[in-house]
Amino acid sequence: MKVALRCFAIIALFLTMPSLPAQPYGDISIGVGLGNSAAARASFDFVLESQLTLSVFFQMHDQNSLLFEENAKSIFAGGMVGYAPALGELCRFNFRGGVGYYSVKSAESFNANPVSRGIGVLVDPRFEFLLSRGFGLGIGGYAVFAGRKELYGINLDLMFGNLRD
């Protein structure tokens, strides 16, 4: 746990350093999503050459039987690439997608193997509003295709880090 906190502190310091002309923009995004599941999301994002994006993400999805048709919990983690053209000085559209590893745990008692694992695909476009140099807001939709499981919805992300000049 201490190692994870140290890594987070080092990354946070790197992202908030003064920007240099050749330095890429980077941020940590934390958010929630709602669709056919409730989701908690986190990603570490880089914007290179002002348009190419690289991301590492982690998502947890919960389909509680009181709110949704199924009762399952899913974890999805991996990497994304994208294209983020500017829509003005304070806004950009980040069309990104990628692949990752998923694990779905079903609560159905009749299933002999309630956990399924494999490789899945994520499509995650969003509008990014760069409210200040260090804070932004991302709004968009997501679709996860993980084996026989499809998760989709809308998301709201808070972005912290070196977002713009």
Image (cartoon, rainbow, N blue to C red):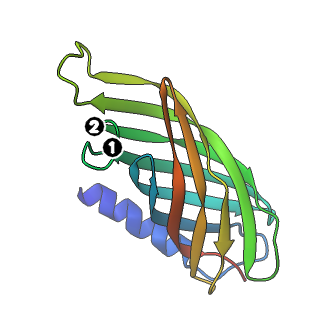
Quadrant of the snapshot with the N terminus: bottom left
Residue drawn where x is 55% and y is 78% of the image: 16
CB of mark 1 within 8 Å of CB of mark 2? yes
Residue 122 locus on image (x, y percent): 59, 41
Decide if residue 20 is on the left or right side of residue 64.
right
Residue 48 locus on image (x, y percent): 75, 60
Q: Nearer the viewer, residue 109 or 66?
A: 66
Q: For the residue marked with disc 2, what is the amino acid? A: Asn
- The CA span between labels 1 and 2 is 5 Å
Residue drawn where x is 64% and y is 75% of the image: 163
Per the image, the residue denoted by label 2 is: 71
Residue drawn where x is 54% and y is 58% of the image: 154
Residue drawn where x is 71% and y is 60% of the image: 94
Per the image, the residue denoted by label 1 is: 63
Q: Which of marks 1 and 2 is nearer the N terminus?
A: 1
Q: Is residue 145 above or below residue 136?
A: above
Residue 157 locus on image (x, y percent): 51, 67
Circle 1: element type = strand
* Disc 2: CA contacts within 10 A as few (<14), some (14-19) or many (>=20): some
Q: For the residue marked with disc 1, what is the amino acid? A: Gln
Residue 72 placement: quadrant: top left
